Image: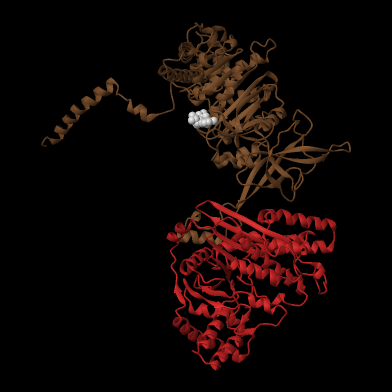
Chain colours: A red, B brown
Amino acid sequence: MHNANNLFINYMDKAVHGSPVVQANFLKVILKVSETIVKILKHENLIINLNYEPGKFWPAHKDKTVAFVDGGLDKTSFLSSAPLTIRAGSYIVNKAAKEEFFTQQKNCLVDLYDPDNELYDFIDDDNFEDLMLNKKKDAARIIFEASALVNHIQSERNIDLCFLHGPIQAILTPFTQQGFPPFTKLAAEYIIPFYKKKKMSPEDRHFINVYLECVKFIKKSPFPIYGVVETAVSAAYTKNLLYSFKSKGIISEKDYRETIDTIIKYRITDANLFEIILKKNQALKPIEIQKQFYGNKIIQRSMWDDLIEQYPKIFMGYVKVTDNQAPIRIETLNYPSNLISDFSYILAVSKLLPNYGYPVGLNVVDRFVKISNWMSKASRNYFTTHLLKQAINNKDKNTVSLALKILSKKNRAWMNRPTKRRISR
Amino acid sequence: MRKKLKWQTIGTVLGETNINEFFFSLKNYQAKKGDIVATETNVPDGNGKIISVTVWGKIMSIDCSNEWFPRQAAQELANEDIDIRDTILPTTRDELICKVSILGYTKNNEDKLKLLPLVYPVKPAASVNYPHSNDVEKLLISDLNSKHPIFIGSLLARESVEIKIDADNLVSRHVLITGMSGSGKTVMVRRIISELMQKMFPMLIYDIHGDYLGFVQKNKQMFPDNKVKLFYPNLSIKSEDKEIIYTLIEKLGKPLTEPQNDYLNSLINKVKYEESSLIKYINKLIAQSRDYIKDRNSKTKGASSGMGHIKAATMFVVNRSLGQVVKKLISMEQTNFRHRKKMVNLKFEQLPDAGTEPEKIISKGQLSILYLKGYETLPASAIVSILSESLFKHRQEVEEEIPPFLTIIEEAHNFIPSRTENKDNLPSVETIRKLITEGRKFGTGLMIVSQRPARLDETIVSQCNSHISFRIKNQKDQKFVRDTSETFDAEDTKQLPALANGQGVISGQVVNFSLPVQIKFDEQLLNTDIGNENFISTVEKWDDKETVKLRKKFAKDFSSISESDQRRPH
Ligand SMILES: Nc1ncnc2c1ncn2[C@@H]1O[C@H](COP(=O)(O)OP(=O)(O)OP(=O)(O)O)[C@@H](O)[C@H]1O
Ligand SMILES: [Mg+2]
């Protein structure tokens, strides 16, 4: 089961968990909705056919410099007493020039946030389930990924195309919560070196501010940067499409409301719909979407609303790589100037990962950030058995159980596909 | 080792280590299988101090994985016929894990490198270094601690590291050289011979193919101080040595019973030996014996010849044995002669009598080649047996008429087959067994060369304490090499089927430890007279003999006769 957002799985989910009425209706409803959406897509001329001829494509694109960026937690660090490390890795490749670079930016979580301005109670640093800690980890990963992009834009290297694993602009609401700590001055400077060099108030160093700076800079990138989300669990594209039709007066307020309600009720996602609608090698042209707001409605009121309004809109499209996968979501801050050729590139590079259908370079960089060099497959065996032996020698129950946990986890954690990133909207 | 130059770091020791081996992750392309590497560690010196030492090891295997290359991508590349070099897939991120077998450690402050067994494991996370060639060489040679090291080639993994082996052990103990045809055995033996000639060490080669005739051709040029003698087997003996006939009958014919021996004895006493040829003499014995038989079968029942007490059957057996011997002797002489005649530029001498003039065969600075081409297994075996036994006797005697020497037996499966294969009861097996078990005392070392080690006499093989193996594809022989030679590194023997010509693994008393080597090829020592067997050019230069030409010419005439004959109406 490689795609939890698979239409079939969604259906099964409804069959198991939904009420009898929902069960009976799900397929009928989704087919109905898709019929309507297809008409709108066709009317707007949003469906495009992409060409896939790998034999010709790759030699012709060999000379492109392409960057793949992904962030992650250094999982290995919890084997020792070392603090949790956040990393953003990049894989930059140009085959014609015989170049394959792997670069990374990393920082320990404890050094990242300013403890003096941390307002909420810190329960227990070691508690991985702690909500705040999770938010801090997420924010750290997002900001490091953005920082990596900023870095690439500033670097001397001429990049032709750049891909980010995940949305091009993150949802900000989790970080607007009262008491979310700002970054330290050092961290902020590291993330975006040219940002307000002299005085930086705690507010300036807050995620919403620092990230905004990054996003604005990324929007000015001379080369296209695409965020790729392989398991989109929202219906942003559909909803925005409907909204724009309503705004243009093509559908009535009533029809709009009811359709949206149905989509919400049945938890129909873009992926569900476009899996039905699109054939392989087809794509949806990007449409403009305000990420942080939906329609006119602010998602959640907070002290950061003014700033959040300054975040640029994004463009969202879909590419369907294979017949048995949901399409992948492509996000960008600017409308692509070479839409067909860029989307064709995305298609080709995703075909190289046929079972998952998203850009293989992102899978490569994902491996890179998740596995630190000295902990990769071959070394891991020696390391883990060593750990277990030590644990047993110590006869310390907790150490033994930790070691066993790691040993039993290693296959799942390291060998399987990268974890899916769930994006709520 | 003092004033050590900085060695290049090529990797990092991984996780768990012990005193026998460790693993390290290797930087791309920085070392090969078989390479000697080193790492620094601390060991307790036994006096309560901790000393820093250099641990030396040999890379036994290298595993490579590219975890960043997704499997599914491979599938797509294959299906769609895409060249990975055109795609963005990473190709440079191979992760290399080397397994190192530890050779020992050397103390860091000592000039003379002596490998000591490691008694404390190496440090995980320590860096692994690539020692300079001359440091590796120094380690090998100083650890070998040989009075007479001889150069044979280079470390297989590293051409710049010269490999030397210990000549003292080589000549006093026994060496087994194995490998399939064309794998480089003879080239190696020639290499060793060249070195030993510089040391004026006497050697005797039993050469079946003429692989060593190059030494004769290049004697003046390359070995001006040495004597190279080329012999063919001698079948004439001195009268006082006519007892050899007993041996010949024993070796070539059927072993005689006591009464049969008595009868032969009376024959030999009766017939006077004229110093011509052994064959003539045996023929005379046969003639005499016939007379006796005639007499024995006459009315007098042998009374007139004084042989009445001997059974006719005994006489018959001896007669037949003598006949067999003579037939075999004649045929071997003739075949060998034919081969010698082809090589007009080479001077062949008849083998001197080893009993009375052993110094003509074994003497300081002399290389003696006994050219056995054309001899069948049994006669050749008898010659080897007679000669070696006779020379060995001289070493056993107190007078020591000849110096210590090395015997080289090529195609050894012909002379010392295993028990199961020794159907002919070859005389050389017994002789060589004796030589090899007692040879150490008397300085008669053996170098045994064979393509099929699994078919050699087990006792003899077990006495070889150095072993060099070249490429072996045959499973049975590979297993044999693994099983019989405990000095071989298991990982090294895995390499055997993949070795190229001249690449071998050497182990045992002539080296410090099992070493994969590339033997130096002395091309000048190839026999230029025979050249490599080149049948194509032979055919190109081929011209029919006169008789053949005539035969062909007349064949046409005859065939036209038979044709016309067939056309004739009935
Ligand atoms: N060390 C070497 N370097 C380069 N070439 C070699 C080396 N050893 C052998 N060869 C090549 O292989 C050929 C055969 O080698 P060699 O005569 O030693 O084989 P062999 O093992 O004695 O075979 P056989 O069992 O048939 O006698 C040589 O003539 C040479 O061309
Ligand atoms: Mg040979």
- Quadrant of the image for the N terminus of chain A? bottom right
Can you name the residue that lies furthest to the front here? Answer: A198
Q: In this view, does B298 lie to the left or right of A92?
A: left
Number of marks in picture: 0
Residue placed farthest to the left in the image? Answer: B569
Residue A215 placement, left or right of A122: left
- Please say whether residue B311 is visible from this viewpoint: no
Q: Nearer the viewer, residue A233 or A122?
A: A122
Relative to A113, say whether B230 is above or below. above
Instruction: Decide which of B303, B185 is in the foreground and name it.
Output: B185
Residue A179 in view: yes
Q: In this view, does A23 lie to the left or right of B322?
A: right
Q: Which residue is drawn at 50% across and 58% down?
A: A64
Question: Could you tell me which residue is drawn at 65 percent across and 83 percent down?
Answer: A298
Q: Eyeballing the image, is B54 above or below A286? A: above
**Which residue extends farthest right?**
B48
Q: Measuring from the top left, give residue B309's x and y in whole percent.
A: 56, 14
- Which quarter of the image is occupied by the C terminus of chain A? bottom right
Q: Indicate left or right for B319 with A203 as reference.
A: left
Q: In which quarter of the image is residue B486?
A: top right
- Examine the rendered structure and indicate whether residue A78 appears above or below residue B174: below
**Residue A349 appears at what percent x and percent y?**
51, 63
- Residue A222's image quarter? bottom right
Please provide percent x and percent y for residue B339: 43, 20
- Quadrant for residue B242, please give it: top right
x and y, in percent, of residue B30 in the image: 62, 43
